[in-house]
Amino acid sequence: MAQNDFDPNENPVRANRGIVIVVATLGVLIVLGLGGLVYGIAMKAGKLGSSDAPQSAQNDAAAPAPAAPMPVPAPSVPTSASGIVSMTADAGILYIHIRTDEGRDIVRAYDRQGVMLFEIDPAAK
């Protein structure tokens, strides 16, 4: 009769000790990998730690835009204006497009304090 290495009375964990060690090690690695994945996602979302941006860039991004001192005088509209066609704000400058009663188009630019920077009137001489 052939000799059989398997003994049914022996503990199965002891008989498969190598496989148990491999499975336990892979389980620990999976848990560590998932923990690292959650930590990485939290870092990218900005919930933990700091980002790769320089500290000065972080301070600039977090600082609110400076508010205009109150009260700000309202931009003046010519008395011969039939209405404001459009208004656009860009980089702290307010651009107002005005159409006069005569049909002329005027564009004025104002800074944050309400001071007129320039006026474009194509019909002016």
Image (tube, helix red, strand yellow):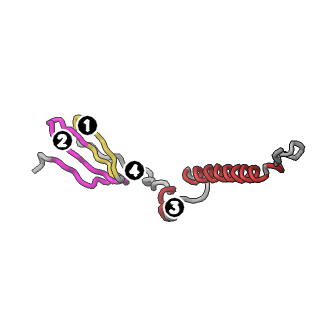
Disc number placed over residue 52 in the picture, else none:
3
> Can residue 120 be found in the magenta stretch?
yes
Label drawn at residue 85: 1
Looking at the image, tell me whether mark 1 or mark 4 is earlier in sequence order: 4
Q: Earlier in the sequence, mark 1 or mark 2?
A: 1
Q: Farthest residue in the front direction? A: 1
Answer whether residue 59 is visible to the viewer in this image.
no
> Where residue 120 sits in the image (x, y, percent)?
19, 49
Q: Is residue 107 visible?
A: yes
Q: Gap in Å between the C-alphas at discs 3 and 1?
A: 45 Å
**What residue is drawn where x is 20% and y is 44%?**
106
- Residue under the point 29% across and 47% down: 95
Q: CA distance from mark 1 to mark 4?
A: 22 Å
SS assignment at label 1: strand
Task: Name the main secondary structure of what is drawn in magenta.
Answer: strand
Q: Is residue 49 magenta?
A: no
For marks 3 and 2, the one nearer the N-term is 3
Q: Tell me the CA gap for discs 3 and 2.
A: 49 Å
Asked which secondary structure carries label 2, the reply is strand
